[in-house]
Amino acid sequence: MGYVAVKGGAAAIENAEQFSMIRRAGGASELLKPDQIREQLHFAVDRVMSEGSLYAPELAALAFKQSAGDTLEAAFILRSYRTTLPRLGYGAPMNTDDMRPIRRISAAFKDIPGGQLLGPTPDYTLRLLDFDLQDESPDHTRRMMARLFKDTESIDPLPERFPKVVDMLRREGLLVPRPSAGGNDDRLVDITRQALTFPAPRSAQLQTLARGETGGMLALAYSNMRGYGSVHPVIGELRVGYLPLRYPNPVTGEVETVGDMLVTEAEVISRIGETDGPARFSLGYGLCFGHNETKAIAMAVLDRAVATGEPATPSEDQEFVLTHVDGIESMGFCNHYKLPHYVTFQSELDRLRNIQAGQSKREEIRS
Amino acid sequence: MTPGLPSEATPPVADWRDAMPSNRHRYSYAFLDEGAKREIRRKMLKAVAIPGCQVGFGSREMPIARGWGTGGLQLTLALIGPDDVLKVIDQGADDSVNAVNIKKFVQRVTDVPLTTDTAAATLIQTRHRIPESPLGPHQLLVFQVPIPEPLRLVEPSERKTRRMHAEADYSRMWLYLYEDIVKFNEITVGARYPVIVNRRYLMDPSPIPRWDVPKLNRGEALFLFCAGREKRIYAVPPHTEVTPLSFEDFAFRVEDFHGRRCERCGAGHSFLDEVVDDESGRRTYSCSDTAFCDQRSRQNRQGSR
């Protein structure tokens, strides 16, 4: 028979796995170490942690290495590892006021209490390809660092906490009150243990967005900002920093700090709300693991967009947004079309042939 | 069971796996933790109690991609035990890529014996087919489901389709089929043909061909369906009435293989794969159910001896 059906035996499948390993690691260059990835490709690591929904920089770096730089695939590997971990308990709620920021800006006010803190960002750098990086030397980097830190001793240390910009607005009565986070019984839901139902409570909404895929969320949020929607965001405050992770001691019950995690938080002020009572600004909230400003802002815009009572565009429809932002789900479904579908196709062929046969028969009768 | 610790339930390690103890002992028996298995089994019981009704569950991420059978796999892993004999098929074939992948994984985490023999299996996971040989009361058939919602064809919103199910309002589905007949003098739905279960719920039988739909009606085995990505479980218990949507004057029709036979085993009453020869363009046919075809070929050889 001249036809080879897509029935790879076990051997062919194993070979395919081996080939992809060789393609990743079979070249002449030195093999990447996960700690190099963790330090030097930190945006990729952060993205993988955020979309994989597991704060584990070492494992995210390993997944990124294993997937040869495919963030969707790396997040998928991390997510399926996460599912095997026992759930030991729930941490204490975190107050992001306690964040130790490395970057903090507001687009709403020129000066804010505590000041604008630009921190590490490529935002203001010209996007010129830096050919010097081809032969970057550790010595050169050390000299740059020495120059940068030369004056630090005479500079006042940063405050441990910064007041929240939106809190100022809230105190003045300019913001709508915080919406309730829970469901019907006001309890927080856990989307890894319950399937989403709609309308989804805000806790489910924020959890889903927090593990959403950056590109997918950006596309939806962008459609809204551009005109298929009405959120005209003003970034009240954008923070990147370390949040202390607090957990009740299983013996004493006392809440203790067990570590910290890098997160990005965006609070987006949107147009004056139509809710009952006095006119007020509304707010969208975004928070994700790691340093990923695009995602945090897109999340805040979507959080606000789906709060619109009567959705008129896709990005305002909670069900539409929440069922399409997960990268692991959308990528998996997109790629499953590569699997054989010849039984279903045979079934469709049968229908089409029958329709065509019927049509030609009717034409014969007519002529 | 605590992941990371080998348990008593873990079967003895066989030869080649000795080389990878770290992978082996990191995971529970049948991969899912016991809490997850319990939840999935409870949801299955609920699904069995309300035939054809979609039950939401906390679908876990699996090490195979969403859309590649993570739903079916979760049911298989929640059900499987050391006494089971597993068969996995994709498009009717035991050696198709998806089936091989899933089998390899389940065996790695359970060590259950595998079979291609339909009658010998206690648990069969399938993508897109129901085996040709009738199943018995001791057998479970687990379907991989891409889109559990039959109404998705006419209504994209989950919120609205749930209401339609609650009210048993399937008028839009009927209308869809009626309009097809008006436009094409034929229903265009090929596989995934909508059925009514127990005279109540409209159900997506998963993308099986229409050929397999009658096998769901008053079957002996328990049929379990699961969509991992969409997080839904549903079931057709044994001896349950399953009827495809049809009109009095426009009957349900399975795929027409009239006058065609399997090149290999000569079967004239099985679902056939159409095979086009590269060179001559000649079309030949062979059984989609490879185990069925193998068995018949063996019998033919014995008979001619």
Image (cartoon, coloured by chain):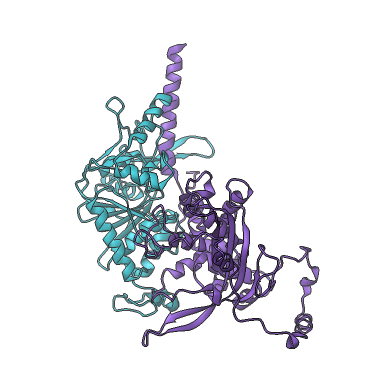
Chain colours: A purple, B cyan
Camera-side residue: A359 or A163? Answer: A163
Camera-side residue: A348 or A85? Answer: A85
Q: Position of residue A179 (x, y in %)?
A: 46, 60
Camera-side residue: B42 or B16? Answer: B42
Seen in the picture, residue A364 relative to B94 is either above or below; the reply is: above
Q: Position of residue B103 (x, y in %)?
A: 38, 61
Q: Residue at x 23, y 40 (%)?
A: B199
Tell me if residue A299 can be seen: no
Q: Position of residue A62 (x, y in %)?
A: 56, 73
Give left or right: position of A208 versus A43.
left
Total marks placed: 0
Camera-side residue: B250 or B288? Answer: B250
Tell me if residue B40 can be seen: yes
Q: Residue at x 42, y 78 (%)?
A: B21
Give left or right: position of B195 versus A217.
left
Give left or right: position of A271 versus B289.
right
Q: Position of residue A252 (x, y in %)?
A: 37, 88
Q: Residue extending furthest top?
A: A367
Place residue B190 in its image quadrant: top left
Seen in the picture, residue A235 relative to A345 is either above or below; the reply is: below
Q: Residue at x 40, y 29 (%)?
A: B180
